[in-house]
Amino acid sequence: MRPISRRRRESALERKAVKYARSRGVVVAKLTQLDGVPDRIFFTPGGRPLIIEFKARGEKPGELQQWYLQKLKEDGYRAVFVDTWEKFLVLMEKFGTK
């Protein structure tokens, strides 16, 4: 049996997170226009979106992805990378409910 690729693990986490957030009334959009831009924007209650770069467990964002996350944070956005389901749930508990 072949091991699951890093990209497939990352995609599975992203799909699960989107499904979970939408089931709780959070509007979610995919960001795909430029290389390095985070994967998703979650329009959480309170008017401050949560911008997430999804990675496979133990993986870190690339250099350009790190630059975008840092720039967004400097501009006042909540921008993070998530590599585990548990980390995502903590963020949803903190920001994703009314």
Image: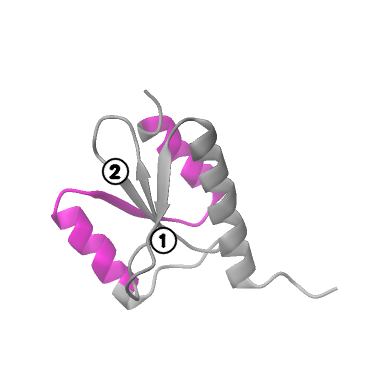
The residue lying toward the viewer, choosing from 97 and 84, is: 97
Callout 2 amino acid? Pro
The residue lying toward the viewer, choosing from 3 and 43, is: 43
What SS does tag 2 mark? loop
Marks 2/1: CA–CA distance: 13 Å
- Crowd band around label 2 with a 10 angstrom C-alpha radius: few (<14), some (14–19), many (20+): some
Q: Position of residue 62 (x, y in %)?
A: 38, 75
* Picture quarter with the N terminus: bottom right
Asked if residue 51 lies in the magenta stretch, the reply is: no
Callout 1 amino acid? Asp
Q: Position of residue 78 (x, y in %)?
A: 27, 47
Residue denoted by label 2: 49
Q: Position of residue 12 (x, y in %)?
A: 62, 57
Residue bounds of the magenta highlight: 65-94
Residue at x 49% of width, y 30% of height: 24
Label 2–label 1 contact, CB within 8 A: no
What SS does tag 1 mark? loop
Total of numbered circles in the picture?
2
To which quarter of the image does residue 4 belong? bottom right
Asked if residue 13 is positioned above or below residue 44 in the image, the reply reads below
The residue lying toward the viewer, choosing from 38 and 2, is: 38
Asked if residue 9 is positioned above or below residue 91 in the image, the reply reads below
Residue at x 21% of width, y 58% of height: 72
Residue denoted by label 1: 39
Asked if residue 76 lies in the magenta stretch, the reply is: yes
Q: In this view, does 26 lie to the left or right of 14?
A: left
Which of marks 1 and 2 precedes in the sequence? 1
To which quarter of the image does residue 43 belong? top left
The residue lying toward the viewer, choosing from 27 and 89, is: 27
Residue at x 40% of width, y 27% of height: 97
